[in-house]
Image: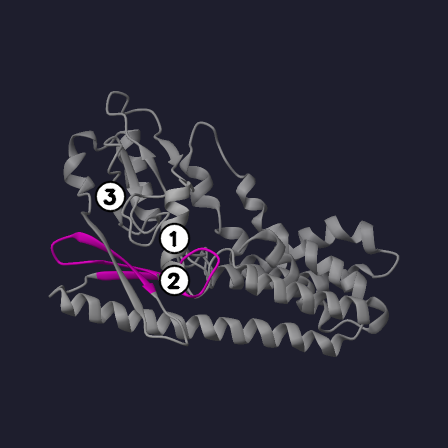
């Protein structure tokens, strides 16, 4: 989730059990503490571009790290609130706020290693976009109301909104999942695995992708409105890359190891970029739900197999892409 929304939910968590005279200090503490988990984006290496991808949403978002993360947040924040809060109070408010970070991120896509270091798996509910302005705006208004009125009971407005919105997202996911099954059945496909998630900044237009038994990835856009029938936008298809066979001759090199790391990060959804033959992308993400042109990927250079791969992003937000997205979002 974006840092602002993390901060707002953290502030809500801290405000929820603060006394009237400490609500504002608690809100500040929660706001800052909830955002600290995302400082893992600073863990990077120019020599190893995949390190940042591997470390993001890893240990700093795990359940066992909450108490440690809260302590770090307390040390950083207490100097600003020590005239209002004791160190213990600051830690408790930080603990409540920091605990929301990994859980909220797990509601989005890409995944969070909640059970690290015991389970090396990313958990993703895919029920809300990583940026949802409606969700964030209402959370901002309700959190600000608690801050202004200094009435912690009003924090139930924030929690009610959060729970109801996430439940709606869960319901939308269920509908998209049902439609995905119908699409596959109509095409006489037997999906091996499926990834379903909301597109950016909304809960109406969903991305549906599944891999059939012939190792082809199929992409669809599905608009799900509570006031009208679903609209299905048929997308493109592409073969998954059999990278183990394609790059078998490079086994034991840095190049092969990096492809293997990226395959794990992409949950096996590796595809060739349609315009860039030397780029292997994550087939789960694209600018449009109907596109199989990956949003990011790694550049392969077989002439230098002992060097790390390059990580590239391909965010084309030009007029053509925006118009296509809006047409699908509005059901046109």
Q: Do the numbered discs 2 and 1 sit on residues whose CB atoms are within 8 Å? A: yes
Q: Is residue 124 left or right of residue 290?
A: right
Q: Residues within 10 Å of mark 2 (few under 14, many from 20)?
A: many
> Helix or strand or loop: what does disc 2 sit on?
strand
Mark 1 or mark 2, which is nearer the start of the sequence?
2
Q: Do the numbered discs 2 and 3 sit on residues whose CB atoms are within 8 Å? A: no
Q: Is residue 197 magenta?
A: yes
Residue matched to label 1: 325
Q: Is residue 201 magenta?
A: yes
Residue matched to label 2: 205
> Helix or strand or loop: what does disc 1 sit on?
helix
> Helix or strand or loop: what does disc 3 sit on?
strand
Q: Which residue is painted at 66% across and 63% down in the image?
A: 140
Q: CA distance from mark 2 to mark 1?
A: 9 Å
Give the residues in magenta.
193-222
Q: Do the numbered discs 1 and 3 sit on residues whose CB atoms are within 8 Å? A: no
Q: Is residue 185 above or below residue 200?
A: below
Mark 3 or mark 2, which is nearer the start of the sequence?
2
Q: CA distance from mark 2 to mark 3?
A: 23 Å
Residue matched to label 3: 271
Instruction: From the image, state whether disc 2 or disc 3 is nearer to you.
Output: 2
Mark 3 or mark 1, which is nearer the start of the sequence?
3
Q: Which residue is painted at 39% across and 34% down in the image?
A: 312
Q: CA distance from mark 1 to mark 3?
A: 22 Å
Tell which of 176 and 99 is nearer to you: 176
């Amino acid at each position: 989730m974006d840092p602002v929304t993390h901060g707002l939910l953290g502030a809500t968590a801290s405000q929820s059990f603060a006394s009237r005279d400490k609500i504002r200090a608690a809100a500040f503490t929660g706001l800052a503490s909830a955002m600290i988990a995302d400082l893992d984006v600073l863990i990077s290496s120019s020599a190893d571009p995949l390190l940042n991808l591997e470390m993001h949403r890893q240990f700093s978002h795990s359940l066992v790290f909450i108490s440690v993360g809260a302590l770090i947040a307390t040390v950083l924040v207490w100097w600003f609130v020590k005239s209002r809060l004791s160190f213990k109070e600051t830690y408790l408010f930080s603990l409540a706020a920091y605990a929301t970070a990994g859980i909220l991120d797990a509601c989005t896509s890409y995944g969070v290693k909640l059970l690290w270091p015991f389970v090396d798996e990313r958990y993703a509910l895919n029920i809300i976009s990583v940026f949802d302005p409606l969700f964030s705006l209402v959370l901002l208004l309700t959190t600000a109301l608690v801050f202004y009125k200094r009435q912690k009971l009003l924090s139930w407005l924030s929690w009610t909104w959060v729970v109801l919105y996430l439940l709606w997202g869960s319901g939308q996911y269920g509908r998209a999942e049902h439609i995905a099954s119908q699409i596959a059945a109509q095409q006489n496909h037997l999906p091996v695995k499926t990834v379903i998630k909301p597109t950016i900044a909304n809960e109406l237009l969903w991305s549906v992708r599944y891999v059939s038994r012939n190792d082809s990835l199929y992409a669809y856009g599905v608009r799900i409105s509570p006031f009208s029938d679903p609209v299905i936008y048929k997308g493109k298809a592409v073969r998954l890359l059999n990278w183990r066979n394609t790059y078998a001759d490079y086994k034991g090199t840095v190049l092969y190891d990096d492809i293997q790391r990226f395959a794990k990060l992409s949950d096996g959804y590796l595809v060739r970029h349609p315009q860039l033959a030397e780029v292997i992308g994550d087939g789960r993400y694209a600018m449009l739900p109907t596109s199989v042109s990956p949003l990011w990927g790694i550049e392969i250079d077989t002439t230098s197999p002992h060097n790390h791969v390059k990580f590239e992003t391909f965010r084309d937000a030009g007029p053509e892409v925006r118009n296509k997205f809006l047409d699908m979002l509005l059901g046109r």
